[in-house]
Amino acid sequence: MVSLSVTKQEIAYKQCSTNDTPRRPMHSFGYRLSICFNIALTVLAVVFITLYTRSMNREHYATRHLHNDTSICMPCSALGITYDVIVLPPQWDRLTDGSGLCCARNATYLSHMLRVIALREKYDAALINNSSRLVIAAHFFIDAEALFDNHTIRWNELGGMRTAFRTGTLNLTQDGMLVIPESGLYHVYSFLTYKTDNLPSDSEEMINHYLFRENPMRPMAGHQLLLMDKQTRLRGWMQYQTSYLASTLQLLRGDNVYVGTSNVSAIYPASMSNFFGIFKI
Protein backbone atom coordinates (compact mmCIF):
# COMPACT_ATOMS: atom_id res chain seq x y z
CA MET A 1 0.00 0.00 0.00
CA VAL A 2 2.87 2.35 0.77
CA SER A 3 4.45 1.78 -2.59
CA LEU A 4 1.14 2.39 -4.30
CA SER A 5 0.58 5.61 -2.33
CA VAL A 6 4.00 6.89 -3.26
CA THR A 7 3.38 6.10 -6.88
CA LYS A 8 0.14 8.08 -6.90
CA GLN A 9 1.85 11.07 -5.30
CA GLU A 10 4.61 10.99 -7.87
CA ILE A 11 2.11 10.79 -10.67
CA ALA A 12 0.14 13.71 -9.26
CA TYR A 13 3.36 15.76 -8.85
CA LYS A 14 4.36 15.07 -12.46
CA GLN A 15 0.93 16.06 -13.70
CA CYS A 16 1.07 19.32 -11.77
CA SER A 17 4.55 20.05 -13.12
CA THR A 18 3.39 19.40 -16.68
CA ASN A 19 0.35 21.65 -16.31
CA ASP A 20 2.47 24.49 -14.87
CA THR A 21 4.76 24.64 -17.96
CA PRO A 22 2.67 23.87 -21.03
CA ARG A 23 4.47 23.30 -24.32
CA ARG A 24 3.80 25.57 -27.34
CA PRO A 25 1.61 23.84 -29.91
CA MET A 26 3.58 22.87 -33.01
CA HIS A 27 0.93 24.31 -35.33
CA SER A 28 0.39 27.78 -33.77
CA PHE A 29 -0.07 30.80 -36.05
CA GLY A 30 3.26 32.41 -35.13
CA TYR A 31 5.17 29.20 -35.74
CA ARG A 32 3.64 28.70 -39.19
CA LEU A 33 4.26 32.37 -40.11
CA SER A 34 7.92 32.01 -39.19
CA ILE A 35 8.26 28.88 -41.33
CA CYS A 36 6.64 30.61 -44.34
CA PHE A 37 8.87 33.67 -43.97
CA ASN A 38 12.03 31.57 -43.89
CA ILE A 39 10.96 29.60 -46.97
CA ALA A 40 10.12 32.79 -48.92
CA LEU A 41 13.42 34.39 -47.95
CA THR A 42 15.34 31.34 -49.10
CA VAL A 43 13.52 31.27 -52.47
CA LEU A 44 14.16 34.96 -53.08
CA ALA A 45 17.83 34.57 -52.26
CA VAL A 46 18.17 31.67 -54.70
CA VAL A 47 16.39 33.58 -57.49
CA PHE A 48 18.50 36.72 -56.93
CA ILE A 49 21.78 34.81 -56.95
CA THR A 50 20.79 32.96 -60.12
CA LEU A 51 19.75 36.09 -62.01
CA TYR A 52 22.78 38.04 -60.83
CA THR A 53 25.14 35.29 -61.89
CA ARG A 54 23.57 35.01 -65.34
CA SER A 55 23.66 38.79 -65.81
CA MET A 56 27.30 39.04 -64.80
CA ASN A 57 28.25 36.18 -67.06
CA ARG A 58 26.45 37.72 -70.03
CA GLU A 59 27.95 41.21 -69.56
CA HIS A 60 31.38 39.80 -68.91
CA TYR A 61 31.23 37.72 -72.08
CA ALA A 62 30.07 40.69 -74.19
CA THR A 63 32.78 42.95 -72.81
CA ARG A 64 35.47 40.31 -73.13
CA HIS A 65 34.39 39.36 -76.62
CA LEU A 66 34.50 42.96 -77.84
CA HIS A 67 37.23 44.53 -75.80
CA ASN A 68 39.35 41.86 -74.10
CA ASP A 69 38.50 43.26 -70.67
CA THR A 70 40.26 46.61 -71.32
CA SER A 71 37.23 48.91 -71.55
CA ILE A 72 35.10 51.10 -69.36
CA CYS A 73 31.44 51.31 -70.32
CA MET A 74 28.73 53.85 -69.54
CA PRO A 75 25.18 54.55 -70.79
CA CYS A 76 25.15 55.58 -74.43
CA SER A 77 22.69 58.38 -73.64
CA ALA A 78 25.26 59.94 -71.31
CA LEU A 79 27.61 60.25 -74.29
CA GLY A 80 24.94 61.76 -76.55
CA ILE A 81 24.58 58.51 -78.53
CA THR A 82 20.90 57.74 -79.11
CA TYR A 83 19.39 54.58 -80.57
CA ASP A 84 18.80 56.27 -83.94
CA VAL A 85 22.57 56.64 -84.36
CA ILE A 86 23.43 53.60 -86.47
CA VAL A 87 27.10 54.23 -87.28
CA LEU A 88 29.16 55.02 -84.19
CA PRO A 89 32.51 56.82 -84.19
CA PRO A 90 35.42 54.37 -84.54
CA GLN A 91 36.53 54.70 -80.92
CA TRP A 92 33.23 53.42 -79.48
CA ASP A 93 31.30 50.16 -79.48
CA ARG A 94 27.70 49.62 -78.44
CA LEU A 95 26.91 46.41 -76.57
CA THR A 96 24.24 44.30 -78.27
CA ASP A 97 22.88 42.72 -75.09
CA GLY A 98 20.18 45.34 -74.57
CA SER A 99 22.05 47.01 -71.71
CA GLY A 100 22.25 50.39 -73.50
CA LEU A 101 25.98 50.64 -72.76
CA CYS A 102 28.71 52.09 -74.96
CA CYS A 103 32.34 51.13 -74.40
CA ALA A 104 35.65 52.59 -75.44
CA ARG A 105 37.22 50.32 -78.03
CA ASN A 106 40.64 50.33 -76.37
CA ALA A 107 42.57 51.91 -73.53
CA THR A 108 43.53 54.93 -75.65
CA TYR A 109 40.06 56.41 -75.25
CA LEU A 110 39.57 55.62 -71.56
CA SER A 111 40.94 59.02 -70.53
CA HIS A 112 38.29 60.70 -72.69
CA MET A 113 35.51 58.77 -70.99
CA LEU A 114 36.97 59.48 -67.55
CA ARG A 115 36.91 63.20 -68.36
CA VAL A 116 33.22 62.89 -69.19
CA ILE A 117 32.56 61.16 -65.85
CA ALA A 118 34.57 63.82 -63.99
CA LEU A 119 32.55 66.59 -65.65
CA ARG A 120 29.29 64.94 -64.62
CA GLU A 121 30.50 64.78 -61.01
CA LYS A 122 31.57 68.43 -61.20
CA TYR A 123 28.16 69.61 -62.37
CA ASP A 124 26.39 67.45 -59.78
CA ALA A 125 28.48 69.02 -57.01
CA ALA A 126 27.84 72.53 -58.35
CA LEU A 127 24.10 71.88 -58.45
CA ILE A 128 24.13 70.74 -54.80
CA ASN A 129 26.20 73.73 -53.69
CA ASN A 130 23.86 76.16 -55.46
CA SER A 131 20.62 74.63 -54.20
CA SER A 132 19.40 77.95 -52.77
CA ARG A 133 17.27 78.40 -55.93
CA LEU A 134 18.81 81.68 -57.09
CA VAL A 135 17.44 83.15 -60.29
CA ILE A 136 19.40 81.69 -63.22
CA ALA A 137 19.90 84.50 -65.70
CA ALA A 138 22.56 86.45 -67.59
CA HIS A 139 22.87 89.33 -70.05
CA PHE A 140 26.12 90.20 -71.83
CA PHE A 141 27.38 92.74 -74.33
CA ILE A 142 29.91 91.99 -77.02
CA ASP A 143 33.63 92.44 -76.37
CA ALA A 144 34.61 95.03 -79.00
CA GLU A 145 38.34 94.49 -78.43
CA ALA A 146 38.05 90.79 -79.26
CA LEU A 147 36.30 91.73 -82.51
CA PHE A 148 39.14 94.04 -83.49
CA ASP A 149 42.04 91.88 -82.35
CA ASN A 150 40.97 88.28 -83.01
CA HIS A 151 37.76 88.53 -85.06
CA THR A 152 36.03 86.35 -82.49
CA ILE A 153 32.70 86.74 -80.69
CA ARG A 154 33.26 87.13 -76.98
CA TRP A 155 31.07 88.67 -74.28
CA ASN A 156 31.68 90.61 -71.09
CA GLU A 157 29.81 92.05 -68.13
CA LEU A 158 31.28 95.56 -68.41
CA GLY A 159 29.26 97.05 -71.26
CA GLY A 160 25.85 98.64 -71.28
CA MET A 161 26.48 101.15 -68.51
CA ARG A 162 26.97 98.32 -66.02
CA THR A 163 23.58 96.80 -66.88
CA ALA A 164 25.10 93.44 -67.84
CA PHE A 165 24.92 90.72 -65.21
CA ARG A 166 25.35 87.01 -64.48
CA THR A 167 24.06 84.98 -61.55
CA GLY A 168 26.41 82.77 -59.60
CA THR A 169 25.09 79.53 -61.07
CA LEU A 170 25.87 80.47 -64.69
CA ASN A 171 29.41 80.34 -66.04
CA LEU A 172 30.77 82.17 -69.08
CA THR A 173 33.80 80.54 -70.69
CA GLN A 174 36.66 82.44 -72.31
CA ASP A 175 35.35 81.27 -75.68
CA GLY A 176 32.03 83.03 -75.13
CA MET A 177 29.97 79.97 -74.15
CA LEU A 178 27.28 79.99 -71.47
CA VAL A 179 27.36 76.80 -69.38
CA ILE A 180 23.91 75.61 -68.28
CA PRO A 181 23.98 74.58 -64.57
CA GLU A 182 20.79 72.50 -64.53
CA SER A 183 18.30 71.06 -67.00
CA GLY A 184 15.09 72.94 -67.70
CA LEU A 185 13.31 75.48 -69.89
CA TYR A 186 15.38 78.53 -70.81
CA HIS A 187 14.62 81.61 -72.86
CA VAL A 188 17.69 82.40 -74.95
CA TYR A 189 18.18 85.48 -77.13
CA SER A 190 20.90 87.08 -79.25
CA PHE A 191 21.02 90.37 -81.15
CA LEU A 192 23.71 91.30 -83.68
CA THR A 193 24.23 94.44 -85.74
CA TYR A 194 26.11 94.23 -89.03
CA LYS A 195 27.87 97.03 -90.91
CA THR A 196 27.95 95.40 -94.30
CA ASP A 197 30.21 97.91 -96.05
CA ASN A 198 33.04 96.46 -93.94
CA LEU A 199 32.89 93.33 -96.08
CA PRO A 200 34.92 92.84 -99.26
CA SER A 201 32.97 93.18 -102.49
CA ASP A 202 33.49 89.49 -103.34
CA SER A 203 32.23 88.20 -99.98
CA GLU A 204 29.15 85.99 -99.62
CA GLU A 205 25.74 87.42 -100.39
CA MET A 206 24.17 85.89 -97.28
CA ILE A 207 24.79 86.84 -93.65
CA ASN A 208 23.94 84.08 -91.18
CA HIS A 209 23.34 84.37 -87.45
CA TYR A 210 23.46 81.12 -85.41
CA LEU A 211 22.83 79.81 -81.92
CA PHE A 212 24.66 76.57 -81.15
CA ARG A 213 25.12 74.21 -78.26
CA GLU A 214 27.55 71.46 -77.36
CA ASN A 215 27.90 69.37 -74.24
CA PRO A 216 31.22 67.86 -73.06
CA MET A 217 29.24 65.24 -71.13
CA ARG A 218 27.64 64.14 -74.42
CA PRO A 219 30.59 64.39 -76.80
CA MET A 220 29.02 62.29 -79.55
CA ALA A 221 26.19 64.82 -79.98
CA GLY A 222 28.69 67.32 -81.41
CA HIS A 223 27.82 70.94 -82.26
CA GLN A 224 24.05 71.28 -82.54
CA LEU A 225 22.38 74.16 -84.37
CA LEU A 226 19.47 75.46 -82.26
CA LEU A 227 18.44 78.70 -84.03
CA MET A 228 19.39 80.41 -87.29
CA ASP A 229 18.63 83.61 -89.19
CA LYS A 230 19.68 84.15 -92.84
CA GLN A 231 19.66 87.55 -94.50
CA THR A 232 20.71 88.89 -97.86
CA ARG A 233 23.66 91.23 -97.52
CA LEU A 234 22.92 94.90 -98.09
CA ARG A 235 25.35 96.67 -100.41
CA GLY A 236 26.33 100.30 -100.43
CA TRP A 237 27.93 102.89 -98.18
CA MET A 238 26.97 103.00 -94.49
CA GLN A 239 24.60 100.06 -94.67
CA TYR A 240 23.48 98.49 -91.38
CA GLN A 241 21.28 95.51 -90.74
CA THR A 242 20.32 93.64 -87.62
CA SER A 243 19.49 90.07 -86.71
CA TYR A 244 17.59 88.84 -83.67
CA LEU A 245 17.26 85.24 -82.46
CA ALA A 246 15.07 84.24 -79.51
CA SER A 247 13.29 81.11 -78.36
CA THR A 248 12.35 79.10 -75.29
CA LEU A 249 14.34 75.87 -75.38
CA GLN A 250 14.69 72.69 -73.34
CA LEU A 251 18.37 72.70 -72.38
CA LEU A 252 20.37 70.07 -70.52
CA ARG A 253 22.77 70.34 -67.63
CA GLY A 254 26.25 70.97 -68.97
CA ASP A 255 25.11 72.43 -72.32
CA ASN A 256 27.45 75.10 -73.68
CA VAL A 257 25.31 77.63 -75.57
CA TYR A 258 27.03 80.14 -77.85
CA VAL A 259 26.47 82.57 -80.73
CA GLY A 260 28.01 82.23 -84.18
CA THR A 261 27.90 84.08 -87.47
CA SER A 262 29.13 83.59 -91.01
CA ASN A 263 30.82 87.00 -91.08
CA VAL A 264 32.43 88.04 -87.81
CA SER A 265 34.23 90.93 -89.51
CA ALA A 266 30.86 92.43 -90.51
CA ILE A 267 29.67 92.84 -86.89
CA TYR A 268 29.42 96.49 -85.92
CA PRO A 269 31.91 96.89 -83.02
CA ALA A 270 29.69 98.70 -80.55
CA SER A 271 28.84 96.84 -77.37
CA MET A 272 25.35 98.33 -77.02
CA SER A 273 24.46 97.05 -80.51
CA ASN A 274 25.25 93.38 -79.82
CA PHE A 275 24.09 91.34 -76.86
CA PHE A 276 23.44 87.78 -75.70
CA GLY A 277 21.28 86.63 -72.80
CA ILE A 278 19.40 83.83 -71.11
CA PHE A 279 17.06 83.20 -68.22
CA LYS A 280 15.51 80.07 -66.75
CA ILE A 281 11.72 79.90 -66.75
Image (cartoon, rainbow, N blue to C red):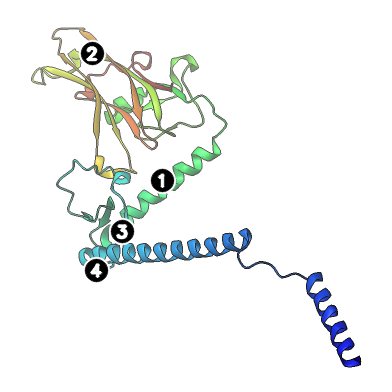
Left or right of 64 in this view: 277: right
Q: Quadrant of residue 84?
A: top left
- In the rendered image, residue 249, in percent from the top left (x then y), is placed at 33, 24
For the point 17% across and 18% down, which residue is it?
207
Q: Which mark is residue 110?
A: 3
Q: CA distance from mark 1 to mark 2?
A: 42 Å
Task: Mark 3 vs mark 2: give the one in front.
Answer: 3
Vertical side of 38 occupied by 144: above or below? above
Q: Do residues under tags 3 and 1 come within 8 Å of each other at their CB atoms?
A: no
Give whichever of discs 4 and 2 has the lower sequence position.
4
Q: Nearer the viewer, residue 12 or 200?
A: 12
What amino acid type should be assigned to the residue bearing mark 1? Arg
For the point 84% across and 78% down, which residue is it?
12
Vertical side of 232 occupied by 143: above or below? below
Q: CA distance from mark 3 to mark 4?
A: 14 Å
Which residue is under mark 2?
195
Q: CA distance from mark 3 to mark 2?
A: 47 Å
Q: Quadrant of residue 1?
A: bottom right
Give whichever of discs 3 and 4 has the lower sequence position.
4
What amino acid type should be assigned to the residue bearing mark 4? Asn
SS category of the residue bearing label 4: loop
- In the rendered image, residue 89, in percent from the top left (x then y), is placed at 18, 49
Q: Residue furthest right?
A: 2
Which residue is under mark 1?
120
Q: CA distance from mark 4 to mark 1?
A: 27 Å
Q: CA distance from mark 3 to mark 1?
A: 16 Å
For the point 41% across and 45% down, which residue is it?
120
